[in-house]
Amino acid sequence: MEVTGKITKIDVCDVRFPTSLEHHGSDAMHGEVDYSAAYVTMATDADDVIGCGLTFSLGRGNDILVKAIEVIRGHVIGRQLSDIYSNFGKFCREITQEGQLRWLGPEKGVIHMASAAIFNALWDLWGKKCGKPVWKLLAEMSPHEVVSLVDFSYITDVLTKDEALKLLTRNKGTQKERELILMEKGFPAYTTSTAWLGYSDETLVKKCREALVEGWTKFKMKVGSNVDDDKRRAKLIRDEIGYNCDLMMDANQKWDVKEAIEWMKQLVEFRPLWIEEPTCPDDVIGHATIAKALSPHNVGVATGEQCQNRVVFKQLLQVDGLKFLQIDSCRVGSINENIAILLMAAKFNVPVCPHAGGVGLCELVQHIIMFDYLCVSATNEQRMCEYVDHLHEHFIEPVVIQNTCYMPPKKPGYSSEMKKDSVENYKFPDGKIWKDLIEGGKFVQ
Ligand SMILES: C[C@H](O)[C@@H](O)CC(=O)C(=O)O
Ligand SMILES: [Mg+2]
């Protein structure tokens, strides 16, 4: 379906949630965490459909993200949607390689995340204009159309367009069956909401019990500040969930390489399925060293939520640096770059288990993993998508979890539209919520 219209306006709003007040989202590296969205709305001259996108950060990070989006939008306003969507991969490259801005990246950090917010809004707009949720829009594309979404620069030594086409074609015949399963059962999830690092032991136990009642069988806990605390908390969790449930551990980049290995050897008795982000996300060889050392202990390495771009993922795959690959909907260049990453993971037969700890990340990434299941990996074996239970009420179409699985979104778009009231109330620093907190002395800027 051809989509017409010229982009006339892109607004960006700094929306923050005071999650730090209750220690939600806390980990070994991020103690005071206010989940925040640099929230983009995009209008065209064709009709009044609005594309909504976001990228995720923690509080003050938004100051810089908002500015970067304001700069990039100058290169997007005035563009025809038909030109963008007919060769979306090329458009992404134009934006990420803009002559002056690329010096800030290229394709990494703030500037890349700002591009992601705009690309995410474009995806929402596309889905809405076509009257389809984005996962469905993607699943109905031909392999050639999917390939045209991707910028293959710097990865052709591992994945050519021809190989991508083959990967996208090989499971087409059985896609309908998987769609039926998806509609009926959804896509498997795990919960991180029981064990943020700032939670007390009592909270941890209470939340584990509640999660078990809800049927959860896969849990992630934060580790990395103090090994004795980690042991005590892991024991508390195992005592509650037993050893038939999966337990994953997440260090959020706390350790040096040798330290990661030694620390994790002290936690293997709790049989973690994976250790996530054991060290610096840029240290590809370090990840491989840790993966090799922990493999005899049946602990896999998981990473990706702060991987800069497809090239780092390529190298991690090339050196066996990860056993579970964690895409993120807002860190790299939106769905487009994530498709490149999904395809490389499929080639290396590495399961993708998306990261979603943040505001809006569950809403967005569910579309990508559903596309992976339908069209790329064609399996949900060994795969699960992270779920955290905060802030969904601020979205027009919040995620639906049924029997601990993500159910496919139904509304057109990318599930990225926030409620107007939420945006108004949580706008930083002038929204009502923030004004009250600041005036009441509960929040110091
Ligand atoms: C700061 C975030 O809450 C981070 O801890 C999320 C994360 O690592 C995860 O969800 O995984
Ligand atoms: Mg993590």
Image: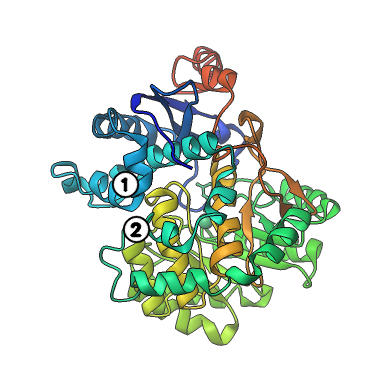
Residue 309 numbered tag = 2
Q: Amino acid at mark 1?
A: His
Task: In this rendered view, identify the residue nearer to me: 102 or 190.
Answer: 102
Q: Quadrant of the C terminus?
A: top left
Task: In this rendered view, identify the residue nearer to me: 81 or 409.
Answer: 81
Colour setup of the view: rainbow
The span from disc 2 to disc 1 (Cα, nearest Å) is 9 Å
Tag 2 secondary structure = loop
Residue furthest toward the right? 213
As drawn, 321 above or below 249: below
Whether residue 55 is visible, yes or no, is no
Q: Is residue 142 left or right of residue 221?
A: left
As drawn, 46 above or below 322: above
Classify 10 Å Cα crowding around label 2: few (below 14), some (14-19), many (20 and above): many
Residue 112 numbered tag = 1
x and y percent of residue 416 in the render? 54, 36
Tag 1 secondary structure = helix
x and y percent of residue 55 in the render? 43, 39
The residue drawn where x is 65% and y is 34% is 397
Pointer 2 with pointer 1, Cβ within 8 A? yes
Q: Is residue 285 left or right of residue 328?
A: left
As drawn, 335 above or below 262: above
